[in-house]
Structure formats: C-alpha cells, structure tokens
C-alpha cells in the first residue's frame, strides 16, 4: 500500500469520527427522542458543537476531492516525495481545521483550510 493510500485511510478515519461529539451534544441538549427524531422546533446545539458539525460537513465536501485524487494517483502509478508530503500535510491540516473551527480560532481555521486546499492543488499538478 502506498503512503498516499495510507493517508487517505487516516483522513477517512478522522472524517468518520467527527460526528460523535456533536451528536453527543445533540442528545444532551435535545434529549434522545428529539435527537433521533424530527422535532418541529429542535433546541440548538451548543455553539462549539454547531461549529464542529460545520467542520464535519466541510471535511466531507473536501474528502471527495482528496479521495478521487489519491485514487487516480494510485491508478496511474504516481507516488513521489511531493504526493506523499501533500497527503500527509492534508491530514494534519484537516485535523487542525476541525480543532480550530470547533474552538472558534478564525485565522488558524482559515490557514489550515487553505493549506489543505494547496495540498489538493499540489496533487492535481502532479497529475497534469
């Protein structure tokens, strides 16, 4: 397995567990019945939980691009220092983005998002 595919697995694992804290908050705030149901006027999540939910949505949106690029790189047999570094940095940038978004750290959130985006661009350039 390539380093790029291993990074993809870690990014998927991170994205797969991001929902847990904000769902726990939903259950605590709304109660189990409303959290799993469709109440007309649900109680809002705690601000940190709503931000984490937003970060999760953003991670899912970007995972589509990252996963497609890693799979294309693997299919065409491209693996080099640049692709390995871009994939590793992407994982850490997404983790920092999650934490900065949840904790409401605006500049860090933006810089980590931009760093992950640059990694996507770097992978595209390796394919072109």
Image (cartoon, helix red, strand yellow):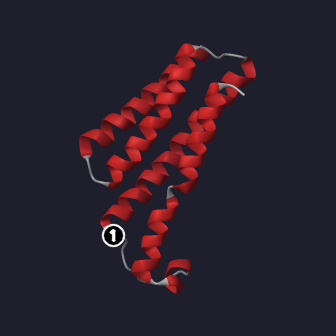
Q: Is residue 47 above or below residue 14?
A: below
Q: Residues within 10 Å of mark 1 (few under 14, many from 20)?
A: some
Relative placement, left or right, of 18 versus 75 is left
Residue at the (58%, 40%) spot, across then down: 10
Front residue of 70 and 80? 80
Residue 86: x and y, percent? 50, 24
Q: Give the quadrant of residue 9.
A: top right
Residue denoted by label 1:
46
Q: Answer yes or no: is residue 42 visible.
A: no
Describe the element under mark 1 as helix, strand or loop: loop
Image position of 46 with respect to 70: above or below: below
**Residue, x 27% and y 52% (percent of image)?**
104
Instruction: Tell me which corner region of the image, top left, top right, bottom left or bottom right, holds residue 78.
Output: top right
Is 108 left, or right, of 116 in this rendering?
Answer: left
103 versus 50 height, above or below: above
How many dots with numbers? 1
Which residue is at a point 66% across and 31% down the rendered structure image? 5
In the picture, the quarter occupied by the C terminus is: top right
**Place of residue 6 in the rendered image (x, y in percent of width and height, measured from the top left):** 64, 33
Q: Quadrant of the N terminus?
A: top right
Please indicate, yes or no, whether residue 61 appears anywhere in the rendered image: yes
User: In x, y percent, where is residue 98?
Assistant: 40, 48
Image coordinates for residue 122, horizontal then vertical, percent: 50, 20
- At 61% from the left and 16% from the top, the residue drawn is 127
**Residue 56 falls left or right of residue 77:** left
């Amino acid at each position: 397995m390539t380093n790029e595919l291993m990074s993809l697995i870690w990014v998927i694992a991170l994205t797969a567990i991001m929902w847990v804290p904000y769902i726990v908050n939903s259950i605590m705030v709304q109660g189990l019945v409303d959290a799993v149901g469709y109440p007309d006027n649900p109680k809002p999540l705690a601000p940190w939980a709503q931000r984490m939910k937003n970060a999760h949505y953003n991670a899912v949106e970007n995972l589509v691009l990252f996963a497609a690029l890693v799979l294309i790189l693997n299919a065409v047999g491209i693996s080099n220092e640049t692709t390995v570094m871009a994939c590793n940095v992407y994982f850490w940038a997404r983790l920092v983005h999650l934490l900065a978004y949840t904790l409401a750290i605006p500049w860090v959130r933006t810089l980590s998002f931009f760093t992950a985006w640059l990694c996507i661009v770097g992978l595209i350039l390796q394919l072109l």
